[in-house]
Image (cartoon, rainbow, N blue to C red):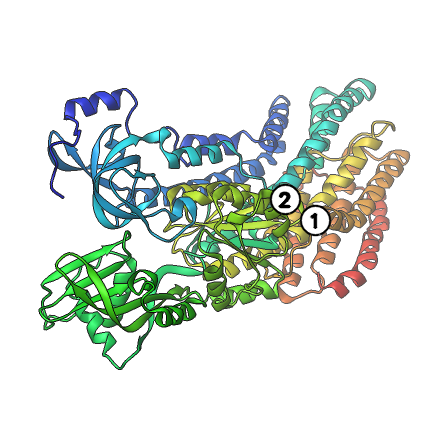
């Protein structure tokens, strides 16, 4: 475009001065966390701080081996941190690869600069395909703009001189000069995403449940720990070291620390698996949300369709060679919009065609392209603009073709008087359709079979969206509404039973999602535009296409790096596997919490000493829940996710916890009555608890497979090796004759829980 000297171009000196004044096109906040923020957010968690305090108390006793439980905290910290850093690196690379540049007029000449170096008042030149990164006003030329990332409306909008351009949109065709009126934080797109940044992402059910458990336990174990220490130190006259170790052991036993590590590892492995399908988890628990969703809201463009168009067929009305005529037209005119590209790809170009004496490039103002040759002229474009009211029967036929969502181009011979084109005779139609994503039908069928309802939310014409949704195989797609005609109350009422929503603005997307959530649904949302950011934040699970706006990618929990929606079933299955296996293994960890809590509470009122040291519970936890939990968490398990997570887990853990509690109390009471030394009583309790925990593991592995059988046998072998070979390392002592008799008399009771649970577990195939 030729530079107009009347344009208010800036000098380099003035541009630098405005940048120094904060008027540059730079976002004040980065969409993703910094490396430091990631490290700190994973370090300073409630769970970590609790365990670090307990470890510090152990340090004061000098018994450093009793700090072994801190290894779980360290592993959990690094797993969560590494996963977030990995996600950040991937998104930052995407940001660099897609970082836009702009043609800007500086010092009266055109130059190319990164968009972040633009300043308020700059004049930039925009052409087809250019992204608009700051708000401005057109001061020269004319362009057609796609604002779908802002409004969801995919139809191009004409922008003549004087029109406003908003950041987040892009140029479809034409060329224009724009003076920037709002940059950086003041731009439209930045204001829209600013609210989303302030709204925290919802925590997962698993993480939220475990955090509540930890906080609830802490509210109890802190005063209980103080009383336990006072009881041991002052009432039983135990030394400081013994009193503190017993106190920390009782508190560590009540914290399901291994469950935190198991959950982190399971989600990390799940994240790596779906990464192989080019799906990126932004946070460790992102997989869970989608696996629990029973409603999935999605956009048309970029999700159901690829965003590209393809020619469906060419219709000749009177036997003319429509394809050859169209080929000649597009071999002469600029191919600078999606429709022209689709037609050119279908019919190709020819170098041997006639050369046009005059061409009229496509303009959104008149919605057609026209070409003149020496002896004839043609028009091709939107039927209502090309045919007008002069050819009602052909216009009705075009409407018939478009009733199923097909885009229609009308081809006419025309008369050109040197200034204007006028249609003379309709020759035919070019039928164009949005390209449905490969595998879309299979993907929607999968969700239908798994009772996940699909809601299509789009800014496009509702009838057209409905037609495309039908082609993609979405059940109930004929049930649609025009959201632009509904109040928020009417839209909220329609949210439950309507499948397709057209002409939806960003705020209405939020109304739909919140209405579904209020009705008890877990809602997933996919999006690719700035207009989707707030809705992505509101949804229980958010999925973004990497090919869309960067703001959407940073706001979402999951990012599809290839923008391939067909990988969604794999993501759901991986999430289900992780959640179901964690739920099965969680009983192994919470059993320790239950019997530790019961023991600590009882010993506040009876004159007995807590029988475990922290290293004892670390050993038992490792062989009975830690190692098995990791193995069990990797097994295939793709059942629907149960919503009653805690009640199911607690029922499974109760039988083992009651068995251990009763056995340990009997060993302590009878051992003291028989005059057995405290360290022998402690050893009896450790062996009995270990064997009971292994029986619980056996129950959780029913029905046994070769892998599960080897797992139980291996864990039992490790336990007995540590007890009888490395007894001194784990603060155990050889048992006397009376102690051995007591232990062997107690061991048969460990099998009670097997008989209680095995039949029901076999029936449920847990």
The percent position of residue 385, horizontal first and vertical second, equals 31, 60
Ranked by sequence position, the earlier of labels 2 and 1 is 2
Crowd around label 1: few <14 · some 14–19 · many ≥20 (10 Å): some
Residue at x 49% of width, y 57% of height = 462
What is the CA distance from the residue labelled 2 to the residue labelled 1?
9 Å
Front residue (pair 249, 766):
766
Position above or below: 252 against 352: above
Q: Left or right: where does residue 36 sit relative to residue 749?
A: left
Crowd around label 2: few <14 · some 14–19 · many ≥20 (10 Å): some
Give the quarter of the figure containing the C terminus: bottom right
Front residue (pair 301, 673):
301
Front residue (pair 615, 185):
185
The percent position of residue 381, horizontal first and vertical second, equals 28, 63
Position above or below: 28 against 388: above
Q: Secondary structure at mark 1?
A: helix
The percent position of residue 230, horizontal first and vertical second, equals 77, 19
Residue at x 29% of width, y 63% of height = 386
User: Do the residues bearing badges 2 and 1 touch, measured as CB atoms within 8 Å?
Assistant: yes
Q: Left or right: where does residue 702 sit relative to residue 558?
A: right
Position above or below: 43 against 488: above
Furthest residue in direction front, as rendered: 390
Residue under label 1, please give it. Answer: 645
Residue under label 2, please give it. Answer: 205
Q: How many marks?
A: 2
The percent position of residue 236, horizontal first and vertical second, equals 82, 22
Q: Left or right: where does residue 156 sit relative to residue 374?
A: right
Residue at x 63% of width, y 61% of height = 451
Q: Quadrant of residue 475?
A: bottom right
Furthest residue in direction top, as rendered: 234
Furthest residue in direction bottom, as rendered: 319
């Amino acid at each position: 475009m030729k530079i107009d000297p009347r344009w208010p171009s800036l000098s380099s000196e003035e541009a630098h001065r405005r940048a120094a004044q904060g008027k540059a096109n730079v976002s004040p906040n980065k969409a993703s966390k910094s490396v430091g923020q990631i490290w700190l957010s994973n370090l300073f968690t409630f769970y970590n701080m609790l365990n670090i305090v307990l470890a510090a108390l152990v340090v004061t006793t000098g018994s450093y081996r009793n700090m072994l439980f801190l290894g779980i905290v360290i592993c959990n910290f690094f797993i969560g941190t590494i996963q977030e850093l990995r996600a950040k690196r991937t998104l930052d690379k995407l940001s660099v690869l897609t970082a836009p540049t702009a043609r800007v007029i500086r010092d009266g000449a055109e130059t190319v600069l990164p968009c972040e170096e633009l300043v308020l008042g700059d004049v930039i030149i925009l052409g087809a395909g250019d992204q608009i990164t700051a708000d401005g006003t057109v001061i020269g030329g004319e362009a057609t703009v796609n604002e779908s990332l802002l409004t969801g409306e995919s139809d191009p909008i004409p922008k003549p001189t004087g029109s406003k351009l908003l950041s987040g949109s892009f140029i479809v065709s034409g060329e224009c000069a724009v003076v920037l009126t709002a940059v950086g934080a003041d731009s439209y797109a930045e204001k829209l995403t600013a609210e989303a940044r302030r709204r925290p992402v919802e925590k997962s059910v698993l993480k939220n449940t475990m955090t509540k458990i930890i906080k609830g336990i802490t509210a109890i174990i802190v005063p209980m720990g103080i009383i336990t220490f006072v009881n041991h130190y002052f009432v039983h006259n135990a030394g400081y070291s013994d009193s503190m170790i017993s106190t920390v052991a009782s508190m560590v036993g009540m914290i399901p620390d291994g469950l935190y590590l198991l959950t982190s590892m399971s989600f990390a492995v799940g994240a790596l698996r779906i990464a192989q399908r080019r799906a990126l988890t932004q946070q460790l628990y992102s997989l869970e949300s989608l696996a629990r969703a029973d409603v999935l809201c999605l956009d048309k463009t970029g999700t159901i369709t690829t965003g590209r168009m393809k020619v469906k067929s060419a219709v000749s009305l009177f036997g003319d060679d429509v394809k050859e005529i169209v080929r000649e037209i597009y071999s002469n005119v600029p191919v600078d919009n999606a429709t022209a590209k689709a037609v050119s790809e279908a019919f190709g170009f020819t170098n041997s065609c006639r050369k046009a004496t005059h061409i009229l490039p496509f303009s959104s103002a008149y919605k057609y392209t026209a070409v003149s040759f020496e002896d004839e002229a043609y028009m091709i474009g939107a039927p209502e603009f090309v045919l007008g009211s002069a050819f009602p029967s052909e216009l009705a036929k075009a409407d018939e073709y478009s009733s199923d969502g097909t885009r229609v181009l009308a081809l006419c011979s025309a008369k050109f008087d040197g200034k204007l084109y006028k249609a003379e005779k309709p020759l035919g139609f070019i039928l164009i359709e949005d390209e449905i994503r490969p595998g879309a039908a299979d993907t929607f069928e999968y969700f239908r079979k798994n009772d996940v309802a699909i809601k299509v939310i789009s800014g496009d014409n509702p009838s057209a969206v409905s037609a495309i949704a039908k082609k993609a195989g979405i059940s109930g797609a004929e049930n649609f509404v025009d959201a632009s005609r509904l109040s928020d109350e009417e839209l909220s009422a329609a949210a439950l039973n309507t499948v397709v929503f057209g002409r939806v603005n960003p705020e209405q997307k939020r109304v739909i999602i919140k209405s579904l959530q209020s009705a008890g649904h877990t809602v997933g949302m996919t999006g690719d535009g700035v207009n989707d950011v707030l809705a992505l934040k509101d949804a229980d699970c958010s999925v973004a296409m990497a090919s869309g706006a960067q703001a959407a990618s940073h706001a979402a929990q999951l990012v599809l790096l290839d923008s391939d929606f067909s990988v969604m079933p794999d993501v759901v299955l991986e999430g289900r596997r992780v959640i179901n296996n964690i739920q099965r293994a969680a009983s192994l960890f919470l059993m320790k919490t239950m019997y530790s809590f019961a023991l600590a509470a009882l010993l506040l009122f009876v004159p007995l000493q807590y029988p475990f040291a922290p290293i004892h519970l670390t050993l038992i936890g490792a062989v009975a829940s830690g190692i098995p939990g990791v193995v069990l968490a990797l097994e295939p398990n793709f059942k629907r996710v149960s919503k009653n997570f805690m009640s199911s887990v607690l029922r499974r853990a109760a039988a083992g916890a009651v068995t251990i509690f009763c056995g340990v109390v009997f060993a302590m009471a009878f051992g003291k009555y028989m005059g057995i030394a405290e360290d022998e009583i402690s050893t009896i309790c450790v062996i009995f608890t270990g064997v009971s925990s292994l029986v619980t593991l056996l129950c959780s592995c029913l029905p046994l497979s070769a892998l599960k059988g080897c797992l139980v046998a291996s864990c039992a072998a490790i336990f007995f090796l540590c007890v009888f070979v490395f007894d001194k390392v784990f603060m155990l002592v050889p048992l006397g004759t009376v102690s051995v008799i007591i232990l062997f008399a107690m061991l048969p009771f460990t099998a009670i829980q097997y008989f209680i649970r095995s039949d029901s577990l076999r029936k449920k195939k847990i």
